[in-house]
Image (tube, rainbow, N blue to C red):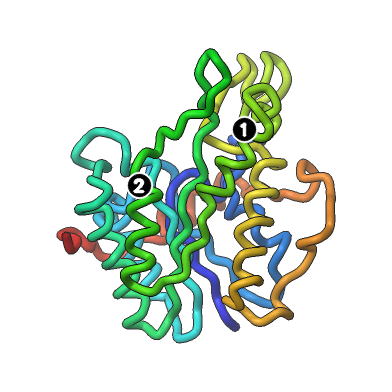
Amino acid sequence: MTAVFLSGGSSLCDRPRSMAPMTGWGQAMPLFLQGVDLINCARAGASSKSFMERGRLAWVLDHLRPGDLHLISFGPNDAKPGAGLHTEPFYDYQGNLRRYVNETRLRGAHPVLVSSHERSVFDKFGNFRRPLGLYPAAKRELAGQMSVPLIDLNEWSVAWWRQLGPQDCRQVFLYLEPGEHPNYPDGVGDNSHLRPYGAVEVARYVVGEMRSRGLLPGQYFRNLENQFDANQAVEFLDDAVSERITKERVGRSMAGAAK
């Protein structure tokens, strides 16, 4: 059976029940795919650098088979300061992604670059800001250089966030009032991570682009035109299962990424 592997950070990783309703968009992808194995290896806090250095890319590469897809989506954590995460957009960030692409191709699998969705950041005048800076542009450039399919989630998200505006974006991102959800008794205001509605619509876009690009045969897609209650449709992992998978999906270190 064809497999679709996801490598990335917190915006797409599977969340356990203790963190609901925070939802990664990769967590919502099974709603739109059938007949394939979806293996979400994304991890909260991962950058293109740390994902390699902690052996997570190695685990993916050990399990890739010819014909599989490997969706690669990093950026928000690469932009953070600190030696453990940070990369420069047109230097080691591109170098790391080049290694992901080359190593995937060496195994007969197909890399797909996915730019990260933007955070919901508006100034006091309602102008939308783009905190990811040059990372999406660096990914677009690399995709062109290496002839890799690019799903430009970044540009799509910017258009949607602007259309929604700062108030309606709160229905997409993890904004909760005190007492609204038992996992966040004091409330939360998170402009980086999605709730089920946002994750479902982002996943719908990503999978729709996979279909329109012919990245998988048509019979593997479903529900792309259907509307449903995201809060009821999205599944969350048991915490014990989430912890086990996180510990298991680690291979040998791949430090020393190509520049």
Name the quadrant of the C terminus: bottom left
> In the rendered image, which residue does mark 2 sit on?
135
Q: Position of residue 82 (x, y in %)?
A: 22, 35
Where disc 2 sits, the SS reads helix
Q: Position of residue 55 (x, y in %)?
A: 29, 60
Query: Could you tell me if the residues under marks 2 and 1 are in contact, i.e. CB atoms within 8 Å?
Result: no
Inspect the image, locate mark 1, and give the three-letter code of the amino acid beneath it: Phe
Looking at the image, residue 259 sits to the left or right of residue 63; the answer is left
Residue 18 in view: no
Quadrant housing residue 21: top right
Residue 67 in view: yes
Looking at the image, residue 172 sits to the left or right of residue 84; the answer is right
Q: Choose between 100 and 153: the one closer to the eye.
A: 153
Q: Position of residue 256 (x, y in %)?
A: 15, 60
Residue drawn at x 66%, y 27% as measured from the top left: 170
> In the rendered image, which residue does mark 1 sit on?
173
Q: Choose between 47 and 17: the one closer to the eye.
A: 47
Residue drawn at x 33%, y 72% as measured from the top left: 146
Where disc 1 sits, the SS reads strand
Q: Residues within 10 Å of mark 1 (few under 14, many from 20)?
A: many
Structural distance between the alpha carbons of marks 2 and 1: 21 Å
Total residue callouts = 2
Quadrant housing residue 76: top left
Residue drawn at x 36%, y 83% as measured from the top left: 107
Inspect the image, locate mark 2, and give the three-letter code of the amino acid beneath it: Tyr
